[in-house]
Amino acid sequence: MQSAIMVKLPETFGGKEAHKLGRELNNRTLDHSSLVLVDLSRVRRIDLEGIEGLLNCVEMVARNDGSLQLAEISPEAATILELTRMDRLFQKFSASEMAANFTTEEELAIESESVTTDKIAQVQPVAA
């Protein structure tokens, strides 16, 4: 069974939270073939800085021959990832697949700091 680091993101994930996630992962000793699972089940708003931060974390983990994968993506986060076409870059797992294949070595919770809503990407209705 492979061990993993589980990261639970807050309702609002923006630049400040992404920076904090990067710092936390950088402070962890990421072994070769480390797996970082990012739980987006609580995420309701994510801005472009948050998406860029996730990509930076993917790069950081990949430099150590590890992988970063998304788990339990909320409908709001899924919509933003689809609109930005970032959903194609991330491998996704459901909760049952995670429980069957991985043991959580460590769990990180990135708590939300105050974020202004003017930079948050909002889902817009699409005309048919």
Image (tube, grey):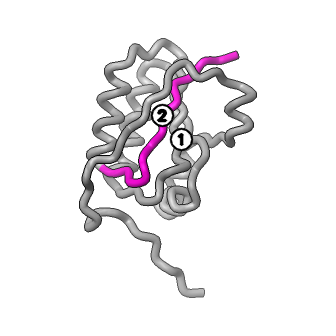
Label 1: which residue? Answer: 39
Residue plotted at (36% across, 41% down): 111
What type is the residue that disc 2 sits on? Val
Give coordinates of residue 65: x percent, y percent: 49, 19
Residue 100 x, y percent position in the rendering: 75, 28
Disc 1 packing (10 Å; few <14; some 14–19; many ≥20): many
- Where is residue 90 drawn, in percent x and y? 55, 43
Residue sitting at 60 percent across and 18 percent down?
3
Quadrant (top left, top right, bottom left, bottom right) of the C terminus: bottom right
Q: Which mark is residue 7?
A: 2
Query: With 52 as the anchor, is 41 left or right in this view?
Result: right
Residue 113 vs 107, above or below: the answer is: below
Instruction: Name the magenta segment's main secondary structure.
Output: strand
Tally the marks.
2
Is the C-beta separation of discs 1 and 2 under 8 Å?
yes
Q: Answer with mark 1 or mark 2, whichever residue precedes in sequence.
A: 2
